[in-house]
Amino acid sequence: MTKDITFDPVWVPSVCTLPTAERPVRVAEFDTLFAEAVRAVRRVGRDRLRLELLHSPEHAARAAELAARENGCCSFFTFVLTVADGGLTLEVAVPPKRSEVLDALQARAEAARAA
């Protein structure tokens, strides 16, 4: 179960094509993934975030599906899902001018993981 984390639309970039009414739902989907699957959150650069996930086919499928949908509305994101050596990692990268979006994503991942 996830802790209720307030959706702050301020950090959502204007280039996002996801309808405004659907944004809180998408954020909640990320929050659920973060709360249930994230083992560690590491900022590996100003424009890159690494999420170590619990290794399971279900978490891999959910992360891949969510990343694909998110890239459909916010194409500036680059997602790389890696399954190797018994680990599961989701890397999220953005252009430097979008680093505030990555800051917000990192904060949500850390808050959901700690809840």
Image (spheres, grey):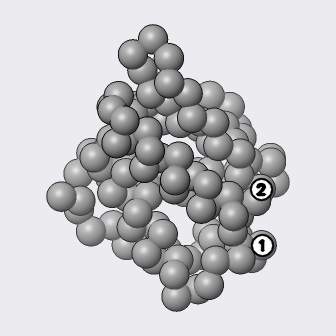
The residue shown at (37%, 35%) is: 57
- Residue 70: x and y in percent read 61, 61
- Residue 23: x and y in percent read 53, 77
> Regarding mark 2 in the picture, which secondary structure is present there?
loop
Image side of residue 6 versus residue 67, left or right: left
Q: CB of mark 2 within 8 Å of CB of mark 1?
A: yes
What crowding class fits label 1: few (fewer than 14 Cα within 10 Å), some (14-19), or many (20 or more)?
few
The residue shown at (42%, 49%) is: 62
- Asked which quadrant contains residue 101, the reply is bottom right
Tell me the residue that label 2 is attached to.
Answer: 76
- Asked which quadrant contains residue 71, the reply is bottom right
- Asked which quadrant contains residue 114, the reply is top left
Residue closest to the eye, 31 or 86:
86
At label 2, which amino acid type do we have? Phe
Residue closest to the eye, 41 or 16:
16
Quarter in which the N terminus is drawn: bottom left
Image side of residue 86 versus residue 19, left or right: left
The residue shown at (53%, 46%) is: 64
At label 1, which amino acid type do we have? Val
Image side of residue 104 versus residue 34, left or right: right
Tell me the residue that label 1 is attached to.
Answer: 15
- Residue 61: x and y in percent read 44, 44
What crowding class fits label 2: few (fewer than 14 Cα within 10 Å), some (14-19), or many (20 or more)?
some
Q: Is residue 48 above or below residue 114?
A: above
Residue 113 is labelled as none
